[in-house]
Image (cartoon, rainbow, N blue to C red):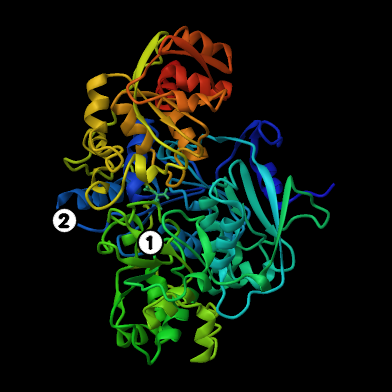
Amino acid sequence: MGQNLANKILQAHLVEGELVPGKEIAIKVDQTLLQDATGTMAMLEFLATGIDRIKVSLAAQYIDHNLLQTDNKNADDHAFLTSAAQRLGVYLSKPGNGVSHQVHLERFGVPGTTMLGADSHTPTAAGLGMLAIGVGGLDAALAMAGRPFHLTCPKIWGIKLTGELQPWVSGKDVILEMLRRHSVKGGVGKIIEYYGPGVATLSATDRATIGNMGAELGATTTVFPSDHRTREFLEAQGRGEVWRELSADPDATYDEYDEIDLSQVEPLIACPTSPDNVVRVADIEGLKVDQVIVGSSVNSSFRDLMTVCKILDGRKVAPSLSFHINPGSRQVLENVVANGGFIMLLLAGAQIHQPGCLGCIGMGQAPGTNQVSFRTFPRNFPGRSGTKDDRVYLCSPETAAAAGLFGVATDPRKLGELMPWPAVQNPDRYLVDDSAGILAPPEDGSRVEIVTGPNIVPLPEFDALPDELEVEVIIKVGDNISTDTIMPAGNKVLPFRSNIPAISKFVFEQADPEFSERAKAKGNGAVVGGVNYGQGSSREHAALAPRFLGIRVKIAKGFARIHRSNLINYGILPLTFKDPADYDSLNQGDRLKFARLRELVESGATEIPVEVNGREIVTLLDASDRERRELLAGGLLNVVKEESHGR
Ligand code: MIC
């Protein structure tokens, strides 16, 4: 029986276990990606291992999230990351050089390799035929230190692509179609593999868009074949030598199937406040738009930006709105400039920003009260823009540009009445100059001094799991709670990513401003959640900061993959309900009593009884032996420390 591509790459990297969905496996990691918002903590964690040089073929550190320098904090973090990268053998992409995902595609990605990234959108590297997985900072740090990565072997979900996209429709519409069909939970426990004749019609950057937002489906990652389109992109980057052909066997099978006829995909848009709240753009035509932003983490490539330039060329954006461009990288910007695009944007009235994540992570660009914002970003969780009750829509660059011109939601195919379809292609040869933006590490970094500012606070120490545990439910939340709700981002909070005591004050801030104080006062606490709890960002701070506040248990109807791993990494028990109806019986303020907890966790028991309000409910712990060891120790770092003492 033929093998699919995801299993081929997994097999080639397998160091423990068997490729049986649901069983734990471990894989060798070839590359790692850190960005600054998760990277300060990950670097501190790497340094805590005492290892003096990275043990992967390539590690890259990007500074793309915390670009706003309103005081010393972010600049101190930049200096810390730069010095740590130089010391440890890591490539450093400087502030203003671009978003990690776009730059990695351009300069470092290699088909067929594995990558762990401390950012949920790491699967953007699918555009190059990589198997790239988003994880918490600690998992990325330990991979950098040479440890294999453990994961539950996912199912492989084959999506057959046929046909070709129509003019004015692009990669973003394909992934929005997936979200329309399958929701933000549709990819949980799966790797999405695209195959079939339609694949060759998509450029590497369109594939990257589809891979990026596979994270919004909850998927472990996304994989595309490495074919002549991959080669074309790598050659245009002057890196043709790293290309190799990779595809599924012709008779490959998948655990699950779906099919998309690209020629039938319409311009789509995700409405507030979830990436799966997808409708046809045609269905909301006429909606007044106040702000448009093109770029950031996704849809910030040359093709995406140049398409917008061509649409705006010789025209003006509607006077009633603001139109922003966030280029994906310095290289994208340089190539747009060289092709005459920059002047088209300027004359049309666009505001052009430095390459980086910016408004995508709430670092500026917040919309006004009740304003409608059309963004090519991957996420529109409530309040993520920085504005309470925000109205953020997610769409393609074509749909964004059409709204920019008309001031209202407009099916971009209507642009065809004004102009021919620009059909922008990526260049045959990009202008490439890394000298201003990428710092290669020295051969020997051992003498580089690591610079730490006052905002870089040592990691808190956590105790082991007790045998008897009594906790109070500090908050009860609903379904699909994202890590943006648990641990918000934005310009007020992000600068504290390397300062856990300070950032912990913001946990659940939007949902319940008193959460942090209450949790701390109670000592030991629990959180109760619905399905897909902890979806979205990989930020381990959504586990680390609650643990700092005394949260020891989370009971939910289900957990998102990365958040669940982060909880275990920091010694928080991720329990589910045996009977989902028990969710309804739990309330804030209830006291939960666990008895013989260590014994149960250690013995491999899956049922963990809890006494609440004089009755017993049964919760489930679905964890491997390795994960149980981590929970018992109070977290993964404690295990690593025990291991290194034992040596
Ligand atoms: C995001 O898009 O949510 C982020 C910001 O890139 C995060 C990482 C973070 O919170 O630092 C992610 O996707 O993992």
- Residue at 47% across, 80% down: 307
- Residue at 21% across, 53% down: 75
Measure how far apart labels 1 and 2 are at the Cα level.
26 Å
Q: In the depicted view, which residue is nearer to us: 395 or 157?
A: 395
x, y percent for residue 83 = 28, 48
Q: Secondary structure at mark 2?
A: loop
Within 10 angstroms of label 1, few (less than 14), some, or many (20 or more) residues?
Answer: many
Q: Would residue 89 appear left or right of 622 to someone viewing this image?
A: left
Q: Would residue 502 appear left or right of 194 to someone viewing this image?
A: left
Residue 110 in view, yes or no: no
Q: In the depicted view, which residue is nearer to us: 4 or 130?
A: 4
Within 10 angstroms of label 2, few (less than 14), some, or many (20 or more) residues?
Answer: few
Q: Amino acid at mark 1?
A: Val
Q: Residue 12, relative to residue 549: is it above or below?
A: below
Q: Secondary structure at mark 1?
A: strand
Any mark on residue 366, and which? none
Q: In the depicted view, which residue is nearer to us: 171 or 226?
A: 171
In the picture of the structure, the residue carrying the numbered disc 1 is: 392
Q: Would residue 562 appear left or right of 507 to someone viewing this image?
A: right
Viewer-nearest of labels 1 and 2? 1
- Residue at 58% across, 15% down: 604
Residue 262 in view, yes or no: yes
x, y percent for residue 162 = 73, 68
x, y percent for residue 525 = 33, 22
Q: Amino acid at mark 2?
A: Thr
Any mark on residue 70, and which? 2
Which of pointers 1 and 2 lies earlier in the amino acid sequence?
A: 2
